Image (spheres, rainbow, N blue to C red):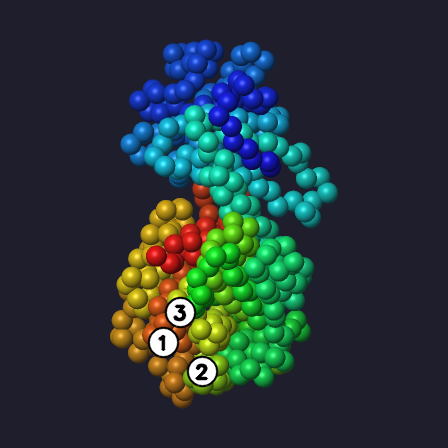
Amino acid sequence: MHIQATTQSPLGTDADTIAHGLFADGQTSAEGAASELIRSGEARGKLGSLAVTHDQGRRFVLVGLGDRAGFGAEQARVAAAAVDGRARELGAEALCWRVPAAPGEAAVTGIVEGTLLHAYRFDRYKADAEARGVERLILSAEQDVSEAARQAAVVTAAQNRARDLGNTPANDLTPTALADYAAQLGERHEGVTVSTLDGAQIRELGMGAFAAVAQGSAQDARLIRIEYNGPGAASGAPLGLIGKAITFDSGGLSLKTSRDMDEMKFDMCGGAAVIEAIAALAELRVPVRVLGVVGATENLPSGTAVKPGDIVRALDGTTIEIDNTDAEGRLVLADCICYARGEGCDRLVDIATLTGAVVVALGSTYAGLMSNDDDWAERVHAAGARVGDAVWRLPLHPDYARLMDGRYAQLTNRGRKREAMAITAAEFLHHFSGDVPWAHVDIAGTAWDVSRPYFTGHGATGYGVRLLVETARTVRP
């Protein structure tokens, strides 16, 4: 979808469909026949409600925006999704939004995001894919909003590409295929350098925890390293973004139940978020230094698979007792965190579909946030609040860390007590982050099948792309 901004009135554009917002107090920019919908009571200010009329050879859509005092980017996303759905039904090709007055750029950002997220379809495997929807989105405002619209479009396109990666089945998106995809970033974007380590190199480097997960699959593992040096970025240590990319997780020998195992192709959504966040940063030419580290492998049962009771050694020398092979993501992340620290990253964010326990605790509204540094945790939390990738901080504590003490090794990969399991998983990772400011974001509840008006149907959400981009953009004073 092509996005453009203009200071012309909606009627001055060539749009076949024009959208106006209506606040709960009755205030709107609509005039003429569209305003008749308000007087008749057909148009209402309730968020997402719709009414349609025709005038001067155009369609007019009035959409409820809810209370003016509570209006922000999220409300704009919901309203824009409703309008996109109706515009698709009406066969609209060019849709012009009269941008409602709102603080800052919230309305512009929300309209672009809500429209593009709702318009997304994953239909590459369908021969009878439905016809395309709106082809052009025009934002009409009194002032120039073209840069805000462009930035929102870039980040949302990256989020939708992360959704594509998440939705792609594991037989097509192998660890090698994901690494090849990431390698294209360096070809498309200035300032991006991508390299990979294969399974043999991972073992030679001493990443025994990562290698243990990978040894059960015929598909070779990949450590994907993405370095971004933005134009004018200050010299110094990069921000480390670390993503879990288990392209299929059967649970290994600690086999998952067959119910919903097909969803385990989504276990690479953290890695997808890292890859596409860096792509967005590069396209926006954000002046920061970032190192992305993505651990990609399958977790499968076989005659060569790691066994419960095995003891492995991580990159930093820590010995780990594997009590459950379905707690594999933290093993991969442990070595990736060590790698990022070894590369000099002075701040870290890891993002992963790590635990079912965080879904029990927070559902699909918030991702879990755990951190060893209050200031860094607040930066990540604030970034999520600004862009709508909400996180909720859960505590760390030495008592939780002790639950991860191993019986025969320094650590176990899953505590024997079924309590605070999202937190104890984070405490496991905390061991490897050391004193470097680190934040762990558990997206198991937010990565797919989230019920929001702008997510149509099932599938990956691309959660974390906006969060990581915003965190990176604000990491330096």
- Residue 15 x, y percent position in the rendering: 58, 23
- Report the residue at 45% width, 79% height from top: 323
Task: Please tell me the numbered disc located at residue 316.
Answer: 2
Q: Which is more N-terminal, label 1 or label 2? A: 2
Mark 3, other Cα within 10 Å: few <14 / some 14–19 / many ≥20: some
- Report the residue at 27% width, 71% height from top: 397
> Taking 83 as reference, is 119 above or below it?
below
Mark 2, other Cα within 10 Å: few <14 / some 14–19 / many ≥20: some
Q: Name the residue under label 3.
A: 346
View extreme (bottom): residue = 408
Q: Do the CB atoms of the residues marked 3 and 2 lie less than 8 Å apart?
A: no
Q: Is residue 182 in sight in this rendering?
A: yes
In the figure, residue 2 lies in which quadrant?
top right
Q: Which is more N-terminal, label 1 or label 3? A: 3
Report the Cα–Cα distance between label 2 and label 1: 11 Å
> Taking 61 as reference, is 286 above or below it?
below
What kind of residue is marked 1?
A: Gly
Mark 1, other Cα within 10 Å: few <14 / some 14–19 / many ≥20: few
Q: Which is more N-terminal, label 2 or label 3? A: 2
What kind of residue is marked 2?
A: Asp
Q: Mark 1 points at which residue?
A: 434
Report the Cα–Cα distance between label 3 and label 1: 11 Å
Q: What element carries label 3?
A: loop
